[in-house]
Amino acid sequence: MLLTQKTSNPWWKDAVVYQIYPRSFQDSNGDGIGDLQGIIQRLPYLEQLGIDAIWLSPVCRSPQDDNGYDISDYQDIDPMFGTLDDMDELIQKAKQHNIQIIIDLVLNHSSDEHRWFLEARKSKTNPYHDYYVWRDGTPDEKPNDMLAAFGGSAWEWVPELGQYYFHQFSVKQPDLNWENPKLRREIYDMILWWMNRGIGGFRLDVIDQIAKEPDKKITANGSRLHEFIQELSKETFQKGDLITVGEAWGANTENTKLYSNPDNSEFSMVFQFEHICLDQQEGKEKWDLAPLDFVKLKQVFAKWQTSLYQCGWNSLFWNNHDLPRIVSRWGNDGEYREKSAKMLATLLHGMQGTPYIYQGEELGMTNVSYDIEEYRDIETVNLYQERLDKGYDKDPIMQSIHAKSRDNARTPMQWDDTAYAGFSTAKPWLKLNPNYVTINAKNECSNPDSIFHYYQKLICLRKQYPVFVDGKFELYLPDDPDIMAYTRTLDNETLLVIANFHDQTRSIELPFAMDGELLISNYEQMTEPMTLRPYEARIYRIVRTN
Ligand code: TEU
Ligand code: CA
């Protein structure tokens, strides 16, 4: 794979990416678990939507302690999902549908069943020992009080060695030691091997946590982070024409200028989560529910849009496999489900950056409220037990789980209204959202006014008008409690994006006339041009002709 010539804009700037959570997308062999052949079957659907790339959550060999984010072989496919031949077939067939495959690289940690770790824990002198992060100690004296994301201490005792290993996530996800150049080289060779198979890009799991310094209790943004990323990029990504996106909960607008430097020295872009964590208060957990602040949301979007203009690049997303469904979170998943889903899509796709659609978002799929027995996610299951042990009542715990559990995003894809929603012929690994009978792809594809067709149109607009890609962002009405309004301007062309975030009709006043060509709207006819109905959204295109 050779470096192709750089045009003014890399290909991923007007691309739209679709995230697939493989175990929940399409089952092809009747075991209730989605797989690679299932994805191949659905390529025509994705081509119809108009996306350019698929980000696949991990499909490599894994004990599935964290649904594949615990990899035991980076160069093989988990039998649950298929074989390497299926993967090669997916890469090739997707290309025939003009779709690139982006794979998920989990490089902060491996599975404790990875060959490296099995070796590493044999002895302190084993050549693989230093691939992981170890500290001496005694059974009752941990190196420090750091906690793991999925509950309990971040240190796990290995009696045979008289040492602890460090894990930021589950005990089955030991952290890799990026200080070790041999480990880094081994990772680069593995990435080059994937690039040779025709991969279109990589999503890098919790990449801001690879340069951890546990003795200083530093996880994200360690002092060697950008040095490691620049080496990684140089040794691998820069040898191809890829889209790369790092997951970085610790990203801010300053370090994202490094991460997404247009000189291509790190990644194409990162996922940052400031707009997601708006309700997160200092010292509180994500489970401690707090109200959402709309004015703050606008400020955060505006800050990122403005800060990265011409010196970095944004990713645009509302959803992923770790987050609740956006229509249930910021929209209205009852009466105004369809309107609010379209409104949220309009706001996001009107901004500058590369949009990501998470499977089912294009159908307006919603959160679920199950009993605890139905949940499968390690984080949810552990959280439930941890809070019970701490003396919380069951009701508030379940309220938090209903609002925030990662399984909200992971319920099987709703294809049609038949048994198991066309997802499988057998009982799915995670319970289907009962609303699949009405909310499903079959209905959406047959209705020209559907959320699906609205997304399709937004994707077309991005390809049609360069102002969607390059236009400069400006926010209006920053303090308005209901309306988000912004423009995007490129040369003599301006896009005006306006949306009513709430369920009351609102009149608006902008410092200029609202006219031009109406490119898209989620309501049929215009009423008063300066009035927005519940969750109404519009994009106008205004061209100055002087
Ligand atoms: O997630 C990173 C992460 O820190 C959180 O999103 C985490 O999932 C949790 O919700 C915090 O409350 C990435 C992956 O996206 C996630 O699925 C993995 O479980 C995690 O890394 C570990 O690999
Ligand atoms: Ca299957």
Image (cartoon, rainbow, N blue to C red):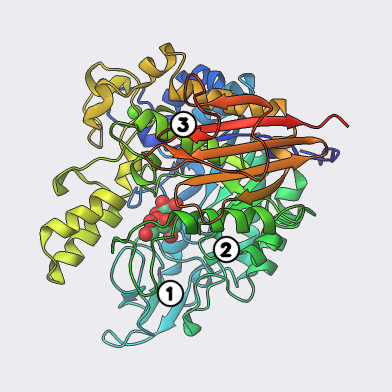
* Marks 3, 2: nearer the viewer: 3
SS at circle 1: loop
Q: Which residue is mark 1?
A: 123
> Which of marks 1 and 3 precedes in the sequence?
1
The location of residue 343, given as percent across then percent down, is 47, 35
> Which of marks 1 and 2 precedes in the sequence?
1
Q: How packed is label 3: few (under 14 Cα within 10 Å), some, or many (20 or more)?
A: many
SS at circle 2: loop
Q: Which residue is located at x 47 percent, y 48 percent? A: 73
Q: Between 486 and 41, which is closer to the camera in this rendering? A: 486
Q: Between 225 and 135, which is closer to the camera in this rendering? A: 225
> Which of marks 2 and 3 precedes in the sequence?
2
Q: Which residue is located at x 85 percent, y 29 percent? A: 545
Q: Is residue 457 visible?
A: yes
Q: Amino acid at mark 2?
A: Ala
Which residue is outermost to the right?
Answer: 546
208 with respect to 293 (left or right): right
Q: Which residue is mark 3?
A: 342
Vertical placement of 100 versus 223: above or below?
above
For the residues bearing labels 3 and 1, Cβ distance under 8 angstroms: no
Q: Which residue is mark 2?
A: 251
